[in-house]
Image: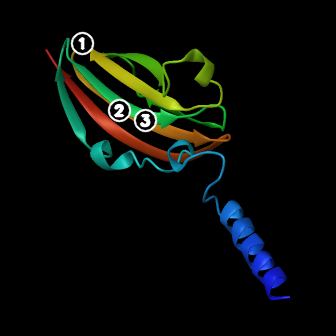
Amino acid sequence: MKRNAALVGVWIVACVWGISGCGGAHDASDDGHAYPPTVPLAGKTMNLHVGQEMTWSGRANGSIGYHWECVMGPADGLDLTIDFVPDFADPLQHIGSGGTEHFTWRASKPGTVGVTLQRWFRGEKTDEFTVTVVVSG
């Protein structure tokens, strides 16, 4: 009887462990919530000269439903490029894996632009922050 009780106890711990996400199929870095990006840039003003670039990077994993989007005020003065870099160099490991989205803005003419980055998880906006970019000649 004690042996059965011990096995039931181990089984319950294993179930709770699995339900809580500990030891689950994906690691916390891929769930869209482990990388709070809002601290370094939120509410800040970035000063650039024409020709300079500014880059921000955030974790993404489309296979589980999270990614970043950039919303800009009048786009005059900033040109945006977005690159996705997967976690693994081997293309066979890309399926289901995450990566990093790199947003690079190049200052093209003087002005002030509000840049908002939004994190989306399974169709819902879960985070957002805005940076003011002042471009001088």
Is 89 left, or right, of 137 in this rendering?
right
- Say few, some or many: other residues with alpha carbon within 10 Å of mark 2 (under 14 / 14 to 19 / 20 or more): some
- Say few, some or many: other residues with alpha carbon within 10 Å of mark 3 (under 14 / 14 to 19 / 20 or more): some
Q: Residue at x 84, y 81 (%)?
A: 4
Amino acid, disc 1: Lys
Q: Which quadrant of the structure image shows residue 13?
A: bottom right
Q: Residue at x 80, y 77 (%)?
A: 8
Q: Which mark is residue 55?
A: none
Q: Position of residue 122 (x, y in %)?
A: 67, 41
Q: CA distance from mark 1 to mark 3?
A: 26 Å
Do the residues under discs 2 and 3 have CB atoms within 8 angstroms?
Answer: no
- Say few, some or many: other residues with alpha carbon within 10 Å of mark 1 (under 14 / 14 to 19 / 20 or more): some
Q: Residue at x 18, y 13 (%)?
A: 50
| 96 versus 2 height, above or below | above
Look at mark 1 in the image and give the residue it sits on.
109
Q: Position of residue 98 (x, y in %)?
A: 55, 32
Q: Residue 137 versus residue 84: which sits nearer the camera?
A: 84
Q: Which mark is residue 58?
A: 3
Label 2 sits on a secondary structure element that is strand
Amino acid, disc 3: Gly
